[in-house]
Amino acid sequence: MTSSTEITTSTDTSCCSPGATSTDLSRGVQEYYGATLSSSADLRTDACCDASSVPEALRPLLARIHPEVLSRYYGCGLVVPPLLEGLRVLDLGCGSGRDVYLLAQLVGAAGAVVGVDMTPEQLAVARRHQQHHADQFGFANVEFLEGRIEQLAQLPLEPGSFDLVISNCVVNLSADKLAVLQGVRRLLRPGGEFFFADVYADRRVPEALRHDPVLYGECLSGALYWNDFLRLARRAGFADPRLVSDRPLEITDPELAERTGAIRFFSATYRLFHIPELEDACEDHGQAVTYHGTIAEHPHALPFDKHHWIETGRVFPVCGNTFRMLAGSRLAPHFSFIGDFSRHYGLFEGCGTVIPFDGAPAAIAAAPAAGAATSATSGSCC
């Protein structure tokens, strides 16, 4: 592994230069993931490692993936929502293809998974093992494209052609995150979703740190302040981002911890639905849903997001946005719906704007917005 000193003292126009451009940042990421890192063991923080416990049902699927692909995995979460069979899926920043090959088994022969990455060395690993996985699965349903996730319109991908877009600890590495979100929305079918894990900060990362190549490559200094992410998502047309899960990140490398100081980082998974009718707040229309328990992995309750644990058979009050997300997506056949939009009762109780992540400083996390409950989330229904 190249040492941090060797990277930061480089005389080329890398991402450590004070006036670094988006091209410089992209080149720095390519070097870090293509040449500096040879496996996930070379990482210096746990930001780009999946610390989530893998569900029992997925372990046999991961066991069928080639060891070289697994060794080059740098994700920070689990990006496997339910009901994937037959879907067309896009993986942004697919790297060596671990998530592509995992999802390929879940979408099945009737589905397809396309991986996009800008690092030739990573793509070479993914492509080298395509036949191995086709033999393992009994079908070939994956494709890998070289390109930047900020420039999805330049790739041979039809607008509105994907049911699901995922990414795993990649958006933080992009120099133009708004372009990424806008590109994703363009490619999603109505009712489709962007389900992705990434790294966020509890404040805006200082400019000097944003151009540190090691911190950037370790998925830290490119992390968005969580509230800025919500603003960008709404600008891109995702009116109501939903937090699915999160965990605080520990920076165990003393040198990197000293550089980042008091900034706190979180790995979080969000789901963003392409449903144009969503509002920018959770409004109460007196609606409710009932979950039938018919999703195989969730017979007793559906964990829709961090604040919606919907028990089977129970009439569950929801805001208008949640109603639309469930009714307008692939989840609809598994629910009954009560009510419409003919009446309005104001803001759905419990919606606010405090930091949503577990492990946030108590003084911040406990302080509700005016008129909001202490369990309020980031402007989403809870």
Image (cartoon, rainbow, N blue to C red):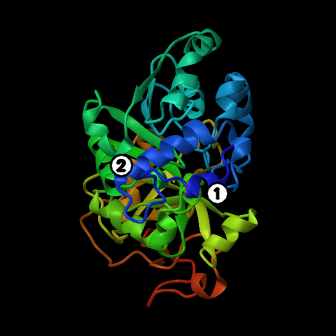
Q: Amino acid at mark 1?
A: Thr
Rendered residue at 64%/77% (across/down): 261
Say which residue label 2 marks: 23
Residue 78: tell me if it is visible.
yes
Residue at disc 1, secondary structure? helix
Q: Quadrant for residue 161, please give it.
A: top left
The one nearer the camera, 365 or 70, is: 70
Rendered residue at 32%/77% (across/down): 345
The one nearer the camera, 265 or 298, is: 265
The one nearer the camera, 276 or 20, is: 20
The one nearer the camera, 320 or 213, is: 213
Tell me, for residue 78, which label it has, or none. none
- Residue 31 rendering spot, x and y as whole percentages: 52, 42
Nearest to the eye among marks 1 and 2: give it: 1
Q: Are marks 1 and 2 in contact (CB under 8 Å)?
A: no
Say which residue label 1 marks: 5
Q: Quadrant of the N terminus?
A: top right
Q: Is residue 213 above or below residue 58?
A: below
Q: Amino acid at mark 2?
A: Thr
320 relative position to 106: left or right: left
Which mark is first along the chain, 2 or 1?
1
- Residue 303 rendering spot, x and y as whole percentages: 59, 53
143 relative position to 186: left or right: right
- Residue 107 rendering spot, x and y as whole percentages: 51, 26
Mark 2 nearby-residue class (10 Å; few <14, some 14–19, many ≥20): few
